[in-house]
Image (cartoon, grey):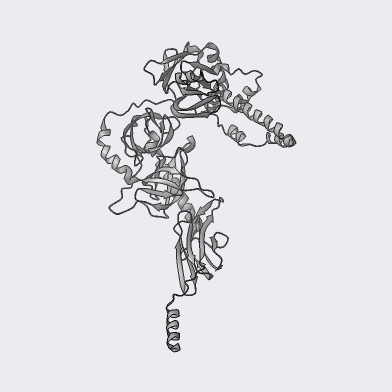
Amino acid sequence: MKRYLSLVLFGLVSALPASAHPNLVRVRVRVILVDQDLNQKPVPFFVVSLKSGAKATELKTSLDGTAEAQLPPGRYTVSSPKAAELGAKRFSWSLQVSLSGSEQNIDLTNDNAKVEETAAPASSAKAATNDLTEHFKRLKNSVVTVRSESGHGTGFFVDAKGLVLTNQHVVANSEYLAVQFDRTHKVLAKLIAADPQKDVALLSVNMAALPNASPAPLYRPGAGRTPVQEGERVFTIGSPLSLDKIITTGIVSKVEPHTVMSDVNINPGNSGGPLFNAAGQVIGLTTFGTRGEGGPGVSGIVRIEEALALLDQNRASAKGTPPPGALLPVEPLTPYPIEGLKEALRAEKYDSRPYYFAAGDFNIALSTPPLDYREQEEKRLQAEREHKKRNKKQQTAGENASDSDAPKDWEQEAGAHPAIFAIYVMPKAKEGLGSAFGRSFSLNSAAKLKFKTDFQAMKLFCGNKEVLPIHPGKVPVTVSIQNRLVKMDDSTYKGIYVYSPDAVNPDCGQIKLEIYSSKGAEPTIRAFDEKTVQHVWADFDAFRRAQAAGTQSASAAKP
């Protein structure tokens, strides 16, 4: 009997499952390289092998260059079946690690990699650079800046008849649309069609005023084919941050059914621009960009197939009369001279009252480079004075800091002050009848304010002639104030119209402004007084002198 019980117990013990390594280690592998400009570059979709004895586990990194797994503790060989390439170098890894504890990180970087020069690195790099240079020269004339009331983005010609593709969020519901080819050529644009869900829009412009423009070649994928693969080199041409056209390169990180992810930088102003493959064909529209903590981040691109459907469906409707081809005003090529701004600072008295006034339901503010520069400097000096009061012990350091080579100095010397005249129109706020009535019974109640109206548009007249703006802007504004005296939570639109330096000229006679609101068709009219006209005109004296000097120099240089 005892023998029988022993056999039964032995059988039960043998049937129990063996312990399946209860203490697994959570392993996080990160593959990240640093390029020659010290930018961190995560390596996505990269295979890493971890081998212990005869058993090997392969991990594949995600977009951020990381991968995770649960592995038994022990000694492992970490290797890369294929090399990663960056610049003119190949990086591969083979290192021994010991896994223990609950978590462990393994970083594969430049420091622990085996580095090899690619075959003929100099000639390869030169060939790649030459390819990009030729692509930029050939394709830059297909790219334009798209202007709307809310800002600007990028677009590109898709045929020789003036059709332009861009993002829908660039044009939105703007009543004003224009396409700027370069610093001197800008024409009106007409919206043909838009698809908000796919974020694509089709515009039409008159090509008569843009003789150097050319269409970009479009990639038309066949059935089951994708425009690019992960790891392929791509580039974009755009006009970010209100600059001239520039080229930016990157690689494809992920191809989705409707989008492409890439590390190519997309800055404000790049939205709607073309993303090209290595052959110089458009494979998508650059749409958004995110900044990474230690690298360039990830950018999203709408695949070209999403736009081709809109393009093919609306070609016929775009064959009507094109928009007017007359050239629109543009910003002066000559920036406002820094010496003229410094003259404004040296003036003993500077009366800012002529630049601020009211008209009906609106408050109006005028802007010129000297006024803006002086007000910015006064704010900076005031901030320094307050800083010194709070930190008397650091007064010397504060004085030295004012003489440093600060970013503002670089902007000044780089000509970061455009020679433009701007008008800002903001609706006034008022207290509602209900709020005023309620406060008559309770002195401690806060006044509840709302905007009187919404800005719609404005017109500037120099004499009887309307002055066309360089940029007519209408932007949303939200004000939220909650305190003991005032409560306000309301939204409206304000106007920001930019004009050329000669928009306000004493020789015109009367200068007046017509402001249109959401209340009705009749505008609010406000004439500039003589003092305002004289101040604005005098503010551009330095610019006119610099412009005349540049014209004389150009004439003298001609044979």
**From this viewpoint, is residue 471 visible?**
no
The relative height of residue 307 versus residue 425 in the rendered view (above or below) is: below
- The answer to whether residue 378 is seen in the rendering is yes
| In front of the other: 558 or 264 | 264
Say which residue appears at 28% left-offset and 28% top-offset.
321
Q: Residue furthest front?
A: 1
40 vs 195, left or right, is right
**Whole-percent x and y of residue 531?**
55, 12
Query: Whole-percent x and y of residue 122?
Result: 51, 56
In this view, the residue in front, 479 or 28, is 479
Q: Position of residue 451 (x, y in %)?
A: 46, 23
Image side of residue 80 versus residue 317, left or right: right
Farthest-out residue, left: 316
In the picture, the quarter occupied by the N terminus is bottom left
Residue 172 found in image quarter: top left
**Residue occupying the point 51% across, 63% down:** 26
Q: Is residue 507 left or right of residue 171?
A: right
Q: Position of residue 176 (x, y in %)?
A: 38, 27
Which one is in front, 61 or 146? 61
- Total labels: the figure holds 0
Would you identify the image quadrant in which residue 454 lies? top left
Q: Quadrant of residue 409?
A: top right
353 with respect to 492 (left or right): right
